[in-house]
Amino acid sequence: MATERRVARVAELIKREVSQLLMYEIRDERVGAGMVSVTDVEVSGDLQHAKVFVSIYSTDEVRRSTMAGLKAASGFVRHELGQRIRLRRTPEVVFIEDRSIERGSRVLSLLNQLEQQSKPAGTSE
């Protein structure tokens, strides 16, 4: 088992490298169709598994297509991580869609609507 500090450091390295791969290396047009960003990476304590959370800004159809493209590219991503990050064993990479930014935006818009409804009609701030 790796220390907590090492796991966090490896997760940050993976996040940086996967972001670079998404921007410059992955040639699958499905991945380039939507705006994709890596929001977080969770690495297991034994450094054998990495969950890469991605946020995709686009329609539902493009999201599904992008996730399929990322799943297809996971072997390439793992190979590239093995070349770029020197570890005894390269972790297995799994992409997971992160919709927390979208949910947060929705909550903020609902709060703004409630605030507008609660103001009296004659006052303006």
Image (tube, rainbow, N blue to C red):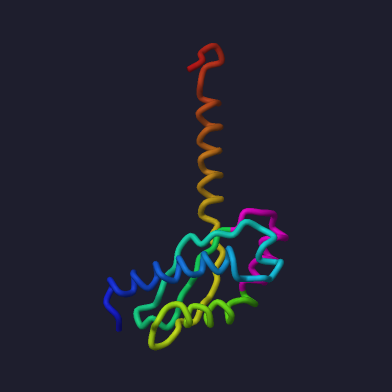
Residue 80: x and y, percent?
52, 79
Q: Quadrant of residue 65?
A: bottom right
The answer to which of 95 and 114 lies nearer the viewer is 95
57 part of magenta stretch? yes
**In this rendering, is residue 93 above or below 112?**
below
Q: Nearer the viewer, residue 98 or 57?
A: 57
Q: Return the x and y of residue 4 as percentages of the image width and height.
A: 28, 73
Q: Which residues are magenta?
A: 56-70
- Residue at image location 45% in from the left, 67% down from the top: 15
Task: Give the side of residue 55 with respect to residue 28, left or right.
Answer: left
- Give the percent coordinates (x, y) of residue 92: 49, 82
Magenta portion: prevailing SS class:
helix
Q: Is residue 29 left or right of residue 18?
A: right
Residue extending furthest top?
Answer: 122
- Tally of numbered tags: 0
Residue 35 percent across, percent down from the top left: 62, 56
Q: Does the stretch in magenta take in 38?
A: no
- What residue appears at the point 51 percent right and 40 percent down from the top-left corner? 108
- Which residue is located at x 55 percent, y 57 percent? 99
Q: Nearer the viewer, residue 2 or 90?
A: 90
Position of residue 102 relative to residue 115, above or below, is below
Quarter of the image with the N terminus in it: bottom left
Residue at the extreme bottom: 88
